[in-house]
């Protein structure tokens, strides 16, 4: 009986323990392209700022954005936006927007040239007011990764 159970254990170990590993394909080398003196259309520029209280650095990103389909037409009219979430799918951004609305925010959805959906909670024409509100929002641990989007003119 012992011999039979040991033999069975060895067969199970050999069956499941001797699988081959999958090897990832090697990445292709990057092809060099000619460099143009004009900046790309979807170029984003990340800038670092410090908040009014100086406690932490506020990251800002400058992009061309518009209000997503179904959003208020005046949403894209401001220059500074506080972003709490970025999504590749519109459905996910809608779900997050509903969650923020339940938390008494007034969220909106922006879309950039690359097709990413940015869920914002406040928009301002004044940069210092936007930074001050961003500092307040970051006090909530849940939204400590919030950042400032600067709309390209």
Image (spheres, rainbow, N blue to C red):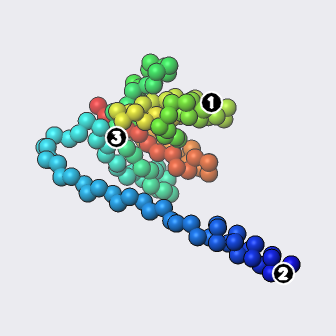
For the question of whether residue 104 can be seen, the reply is no
Residue, disc 2 = 2
| Element carrying mark 2 | helix
The location of residue 7, given as percent across then percent down, is 75, 76
145 left or right of 31 in image: right
Between label 1 and label 2, give the one nearer the viewer. Answer: 2
Residue, disc 1 = 98
Instruction: Give the alpha-carbon distance from disc 3 to disc 1, as whole Å.
Output: 26 Å
Which one is in front, 58 or 99?
Answer: 99
Residue, disc 3 = 62
- Residue at the image point whose x is 25% and y is 54% from the top: 30
Between label 2 and label 3, give the one nearer the viewer. Answer: 2
For label 1, the crowd category at 10 Å Cα-Cα, with few meaning under 14, some 14 to 19 and many 20 or more, is some
Q: Earlier in the sequence, mark 2 or mark 3?
A: 2
- 80 shown above or below 10: above
- Quarter of the view holding residue 113: top left
Q: Earlier in the sequence, mark 3 or mark 1?
A: 3
| Element carrying mark 1 | helix
């Amino acid at each position: 009986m012992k011999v039979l159970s040991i033999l069975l254990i060895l067969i199970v170990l050999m069956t499941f323990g001797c699988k081959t590993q999958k090897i990832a394909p090697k990445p292709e080398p990057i092809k060099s392209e000619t460099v143009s003196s004009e900046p790309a259309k979807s170029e984003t520029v990340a800038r670092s700022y410090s908040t009014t209280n100086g406690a932490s650095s506020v990251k800002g990103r400058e992009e061309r954005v518009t209000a997503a389909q179904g959003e208020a037409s005046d949403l894209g009219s401001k220059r500074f936006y506080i972003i709490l979430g970025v999504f590749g799918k519109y459905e996910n951004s809608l779900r997050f927007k509903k969650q923020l609305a339940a938390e008494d925010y007034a969220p909106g959805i922006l879309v950039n040239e690359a097709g990413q959906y940015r869920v914002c909670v406040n928009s301002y024409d004044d940069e210092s007011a936007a930074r001050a509100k961003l500092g307040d929002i970051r006090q909530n641990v849940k939204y400590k990764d919030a950042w400032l989007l600067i709309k390209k003119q």
